[in-house]
Image: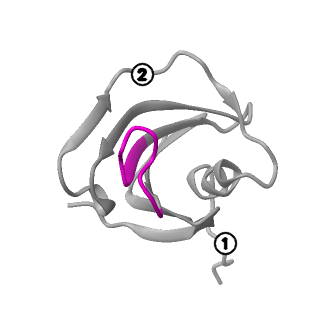
């Protein structure tokens, strides 16, 4: 069961992360994100979960898997699934939702200094 945490709203759609799925390697990080749409998309889905990989050093991202559901919060029938790793990397643009996710996924040290 996913532990979704609210990240923000973009154009009426709600973006959530499952921080329990965060995996960091020396240069990359992966995390699951979920988008709940305010109305059905062209594919007739109300939620899409994406497994995102970030190249933390090069400011790039790609999808490792994408799943679309007929209901919000991954409910209802799975209307499409693409479990194949994408070969194309996209640039993480400043001010984008992916930049916000990258800031969380690629953080390597605590935000609060330990005494």
Q: Disc 1 and disc 2: Cα gap in Å? A: 31 Å
* Figure disc tally: 2
- Quick one: 89 or 12, which is closer to the camera? 12
On the image, numbered disc 1 is attached to which residue? 111
Whether residue 59 appears in magenta in the rendering, the answer is no
- Quick one: 65 or 59, which is closer to the camera? 65
Which color scheme does this rendered protein use? one colour
SS category of the residue bearing label 1:
loop
On the image, numbered disc 2 is attached to which residue? 85
Task: Give the label on residue 10, or none.
Answer: none
Camera-side mark, 1 or 2: 2
Residue appearing at x 42%, y 30% in the figure:
64
The image quadrant of residue 58 is top right
SS category of the residue bearing label 2:
loop
Vertical order, 11 against 68 (above or below): below
Residue appearing at x 37%, y 53% in the figure:
47
- Quick one: 66 or 107, which is closer to the camera? 66
The image quadrant of residue 18 is bottom left
Callout 2: few (<14), some (14-19), or many (20+) C-alpha neighbours within 10 Å? some
Whether residue 46 appears in magenta in the rendering, the answer is yes
Q: Are marks 1 and 2 in contact (CB under 8 Å)?
A: no
User: What segment is highlighted magenta in the picture?
Assistant: 38-50
> Which secondary structure dominates the residues rendered in magenta?
loop
Counting from the top left corner in percent of width and height, residue 12 is at 58, 66
């Amino acid at each position: 069961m996913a532990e979704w945490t609210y990240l923000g709203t973009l154009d009426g759609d709600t973006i959530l992360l499952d921080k329990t799925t965060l995996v960091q390697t020396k240069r990359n990080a992966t995390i699951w994100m979920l988008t709940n749409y305010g109305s059905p998309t062209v594919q007739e889905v109300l939620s899409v979960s994406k497994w995102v990989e970030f190249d933390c050093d090069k400011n790039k991202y790609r999808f490792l898997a994408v799943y679309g559901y007929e209901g919000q919060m991954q409910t209802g029938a799975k209307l499409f699934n693409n479990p194949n790793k994408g070969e194309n990397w996209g640039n993480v643009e400043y001010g984008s939702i992916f930049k916000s996710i990258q800031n969380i996924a690629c953080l390597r040290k605590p935000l609060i200094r330990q005494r």
